[in-house]
Image: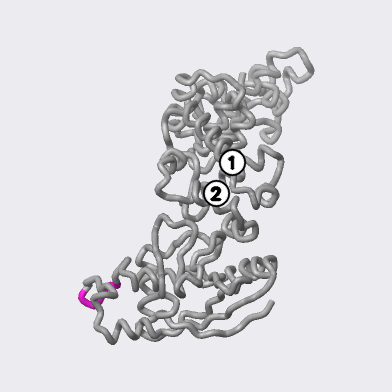
Amino acid sequence: MKTNLVRYTVRDVCEGFVYSALDEKGLFGLGGRLTIQPEYQRSYIYADKKKDAPVIASVLKNYPLGLFYFNKLDDGSLEILDGQQRVTSIGRFVTGRFGIIDENQIPQYFSGLPADKQNQILDYELLVYECEGTESEIKEWFKTINIAGEPLNEQELLNAVYSGPFVSAGKEEFSNTLNANIQKWDAFVRGPANRQKFWERALEWTSASKKMSIGEYMSQHRMNPDISEVKTYFNSVIDWASTLFEDVDDHMRGLEWGEMFEKYRSARYDTKAINERVRELLSDPYVKNPRGIWAYLLGGETEKNLLDIRVFDEATKRSVYAKQTAAARENGTSNCPLCELGHSANQSKIWDLKEMDADHVAAWSRGGETMTKNCQMLCSTHNKAKGNR
């Protein structure tokens, strides 16, 4: 890969600068010759005045902003390989998209600055490496140089590696914060749209249904602008979950809904009953992992480990063991209540504490509380056999 060191001024880069929050296909500068936001780049994430304002402050103080990397295409046009966020911040300020706060806490926009300050900004030099190479070389370098600074997440890197019509169409649908479906999706997917979280989840669920990784699926569809399969599957999962569970709870966000959809979509549930159970379990102080509630209910309430139910503490176990053992010795029976009822040699066996497990007399799943009065010590064999009975 060849590189050429070039100096551009802000005036050069901002020539023809076009900015639109809705434009997912790119921002442009250098009179249209420079694509500031290529299709495979992430959406602009500095627009919070905590990161873009310091960029302008650095320019006004003539501090260096670091190196920029532009990719030179076969037709002579350029696209930003690294530095998109910094260049976009500069362009947004010069075109009046935000102001910087002065010492009097008053926002100062570019158009309101003295002419000498405006020229200082416009004449500020950006040190740029223009790079030429194969697509794989450029994309691999892109991944490497983005390790530092504001690092790309996994989906943003995959967008870079598999850039093309498929990624462009996917971002237009799933990374657009003005998409009317975002609010509905947000109940089940954790993370911001502009960091590709909805796009990532849609790909994850769809590719998993095909027994493929996200990368394999993206590679297979890379040059296809049709994302209808991803949209259909993603919305099928969301519609299934939102129809089944009426209440929206923050613990639902980010769960493996795609996996649950594949596993339970053919099962039939009493919607009223299952929603009542969700409310009961969310208010149950013994449920230590509320995020496991939905999988627990869909699975027929058999996997208590999903809820991480609060267990009897050691003090309770020792207290109950001592009481049961004292009574058993006095009566000449086993200190395991179920062994006592049997007809084997264990009917009068006194088990050591380490050979016994704490058990709910009334099963937790049937309303039994994790309290001393509902605790009994059983030999390990009988405890395992009892289950939820």
- Asked whether the beta carbons under mark 2 and mark 1 sit within 8 Å of each other, the answer is yes
The circle on residue 230 is 1
Residue under the image location 64 percent in, 30 percent down: 263
Toward which corner of the image does residue 136 lie, by quadrant?
bottom right
Q: Secondary structure at mark 2?
A: helix
Q: Which residue is mark 2?
A: 170
Depth check, front residue: 291 or 83: 83
Query: Which of the two discs, 2 and 1, labels the residue nearer the N terminus?
Result: 2
Q: Quadrant of the C terminus?
A: top right
Whether residue 157 is situated above or below residue 67 in the rendered picture: above
Q: Which residues are magenta?
A: 100-104
Q: Residue furthest front?
A: 75
Depth check, front residue: 182 or 309: 182
Amino acid type of the residue tagged 2 in the rendering: Gly
Q: Position of residue 56 (x, y in %)?
A: 37, 76
Residue under the image location 53 percent in, 32 percent down: 294
Q: Position of residue 181 (x, y in %)?
A: 43, 40
Residue under the image location 68 percent in, 73 percent down: 133
Q: Position of residue 155 (x, y in %)?
A: 58, 55
Chosen colour scheme: one colour
Q: Main secondary structure of the magenta part?
A: loop
Q: Position of residue 388 (x, y in %)?
A: 61, 22
